[in-house]
Image (cartoon, rainbow, N blue to C red):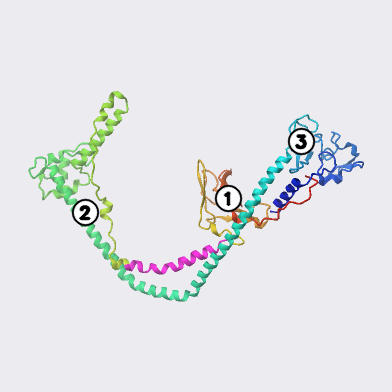
């Protein structure tokens, strides 16, 4: 905020005072005026040589560092200082002097090119003051919000620490209760285990009985379907019509193969069909299922033919109307184990009641262990996620979920609270593991403002939050003008 304070002070100073231009050679900043004293020999700023002052800005480069030509384009490594009164001073390369393009808002870089430049410093200064004033307002409001966040975090932390303290104080009592429950549980485990086993065994027996009844019903239905002449017997010729029963899958069901399925008998009645059913039930297709399969193949064939052209499209009209079937219980529903009886269920749930103490205490201690900032101002982000939707993706940021505070290079230690780093993400295709750097800036709202991918699989997020807003410095403008600006 010190830089913002200084810049605001300087800009406001310009708006209130009349700029005073101190005479010095063209292109020389005020900070280096003492090296350019007219009438005295000039020493190159790199100390390489000394020349008469009249050779300064004579459009000939005498110094290796170009310092003797701050106002001309003679030296390739020289630089020109734009005073830009009313705005911000700046340096430009000497090569841009008198190139027909106005680089300095005060037009001083085009003093001899004939370019028609307009002094825009006053307007630029006005716009910058508006931006800086808006930034100052956001910073002020954000800092007030931050104070509220700190106060809320403090109260919340005290409450959580109080809960942990209470739990620790009651630890012995709770452990005694847990031990008592453990004793009860151990005593109940055996009957609980036996109850479960009895329940499971009874259910397995019930399922076996259900399956047997279903199999008998299918067998009786199959016998009636196979007995084409309804004489009470299934003969070799009647069974031979079901090609799907072919044992060697060569496409032909021979009389010898059928006799093998029938145990050598020429025909069987309902009492002896059970042994035949054992041999054929895994392959047997009922008349209904075969008709449905044939119709499905026919309709598929007709639709495929219809795709070749309008001359064959008539085949598509031969379609059966849709059949509405009453929903039936699925095989899984029928074989799902019914709930335990009340006594067994009570034994299973009895031990769960003593587990909540440990989980609650561990969750609170985990939250208290996080670094939520110097004054816990980031606490409100815990367990929260923030999204930014683009035309291609939805980016989601969940602070403190595997994120570590980071510090930008060559920045002080307290800078770490302005950067979050997420590393060791999922791997890119033939590339490194994904990582994300989140840069936090002051704002009244907590939002993800932008995302980018500066390097492959390395993402950058811009994130605003009042938690990083600093106390605004006094930005009242100085009553005096500034001679440089």
User: Which stretch is magenta?
Assistant: 346-372
Percent from the top left, x then y, of residue 314?
A: 26, 26
Q: Circle 2 is placed at which residue position?
A: 211
* Residue reaching furthest to the top: 311
User: Which quadrant would residue 239 be assigned to in this image?
Assistant: top left
Task: State the SS at label 3.
Answer: loop
Q: Are marks 2 and 1 in contact (CB under 8 Å)?
A: no
Closer to us: 215 or 79: 79
Looking at the image, how many numbered discs can be counted on the residues? 3
Q: Residues within 10 Å of mark 1 (few under 14, many from 20)?
A: many
Using residue 382 as the reference point, say whether residue 268 is left or right of it: left
Check disc 2: other Cα within 10 Å, few if <14, some if 14-19, many if 20+.
Answer: few
Main SS, magenta region, reads helix
Can residue 250 be seen at all in this image of the molecule? no
In the rendered image, is residue 383 in sight? Answer: yes
Image coordinates for residue 84, horizontal then vertical, percent: 76, 41
Instruction: Report if the CB atoms under discs 2 and 3 are less than 8 Å apart.
Output: no
Please identify, in this view, whether the residue under mark 2 or under mark 1 is nearer the observer: 1
Q: What residue appears at the point 59 percent right and 51 percent down from the top-left corner?
A: 464
Whether 369 is among the magenta residues is yes
Looking at the rendered structure, the secondary structure element under dot 1 is strand
**Picture residue at 58% right of the left edge, 63% below the top:** 151
Q: Position of residue 86 (x, y in %)?
A: 75, 43
Residue position marked by numbered label 3 in the rendering = 107
Q: Secondary structure at mark 2?
A: helix
Asked if labels 3 and 1 touch by Cβ distance under 8 angstroms, the answer is no
In the rendered view, tell whether residue 134 sits above or below residue 252: below
Q: In this view, which residue lies farthest toward the left?
A: 231
Q: Which residue is mark 1?
A: 463
Q: Is residue 255 above or below residue 210?
A: above
Image position of 202 (left or right of 1): left
- Tell me which numbered mark, 2 or 1, is placed earlier along the sequence: 2
């Amino acid at each position: 905020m010190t830089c913002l304070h200084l810049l605001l002070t300087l800009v406001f100073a310009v708006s209130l005072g009349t700029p005073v231009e101190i005479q010095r050679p063209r292109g020389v900043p005020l900070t280096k005026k003492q090296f350019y004293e007219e009438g005295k020999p000039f020493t190159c700023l790199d100390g390489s040589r000394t020349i008469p002052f009249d050779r300064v800005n004579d459009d000939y480069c005498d110094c290796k560092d170009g310092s003797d030509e701050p106002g001309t384009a003679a030296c390739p490594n020289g630089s020109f200082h734009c005073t830009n009164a009313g705005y911000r001073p700046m340096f430009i390369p000497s090569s841009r002097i008198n190139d027909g393009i106005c680089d300095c808002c005060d037009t001083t870089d085009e003093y001899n090119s004939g370019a028609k430049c307009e002094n825009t410093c006053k307007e630029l200064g006005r716009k910058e003051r508006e931006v800086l004033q808006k930034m100052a307002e956001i910073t002020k409001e954000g800092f007030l919000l931050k104070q509220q966040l700190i106060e809320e975090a403090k109260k919340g932390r005290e409450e959580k620490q109080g809960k942990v303290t209470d739990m620790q104080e009651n630890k012995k009592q709770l452990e005694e209760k847990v031990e008592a429950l453990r004793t009860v549980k151990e005593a109940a485990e055996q009957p609980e285990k036996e109850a479960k086993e009895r329940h499971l065994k009874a259910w397995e027996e019930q399922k076996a009985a259900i399956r047997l009844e279903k199999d008998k019903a299918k067998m009786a239905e199959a016998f009636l379907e196979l007995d084409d002449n309804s004489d009470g017997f299934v003969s070799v010729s009647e069974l031979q019509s079901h090609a799907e029963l072919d044992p060697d899958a060569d496409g032909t069901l021979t009389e010898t193969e059928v006799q093998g399925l029938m145990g050598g008998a020429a025909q069987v009645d309902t009492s002896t069909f059970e042994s035949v059913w054992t041999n054929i039930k895994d392959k047997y297709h009922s008349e209904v299922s075969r008709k449905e399969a044939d119709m499905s193949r026919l309709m598929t064939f007709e639709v495929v033919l219809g795709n070749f052209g309008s001359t064959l499209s008539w085949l598509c009209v031969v379609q059966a109307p849709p059949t509405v079937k009453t929903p039936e219980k699925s095989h899984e529903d029928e074989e799902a184990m019914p709930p335990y009886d009340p006594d067994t269920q009570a034994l299973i749930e009895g031990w769960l009641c003593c587990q909540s103490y440990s989980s609650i205490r561990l969750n609170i201690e985990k939250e208290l262990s996080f670094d939520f900032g110097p004054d816990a101002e980031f606490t409100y982000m815990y367990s929260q996620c923030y999204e930014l939707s683009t035309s291609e993706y939805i980016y989601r940021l969940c602070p403190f979920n595997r994120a570590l505070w980071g510090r930008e290079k060559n920045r002080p230690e307290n800078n770490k609270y302005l950067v979050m780093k997420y590393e060791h993400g999922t791997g890119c295709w033939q590339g490194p593991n994904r990582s994300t750097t989140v840069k936090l800036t002051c704002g009244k709202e907590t939002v993800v403002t932008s995302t980018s991918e500066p390097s492959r699989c390395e993402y950058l997020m811009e994130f605003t939050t009042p938690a990083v807003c600093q106390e605004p410095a006094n930005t009242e403008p100085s009553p005096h003008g500034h001679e440089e600006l």
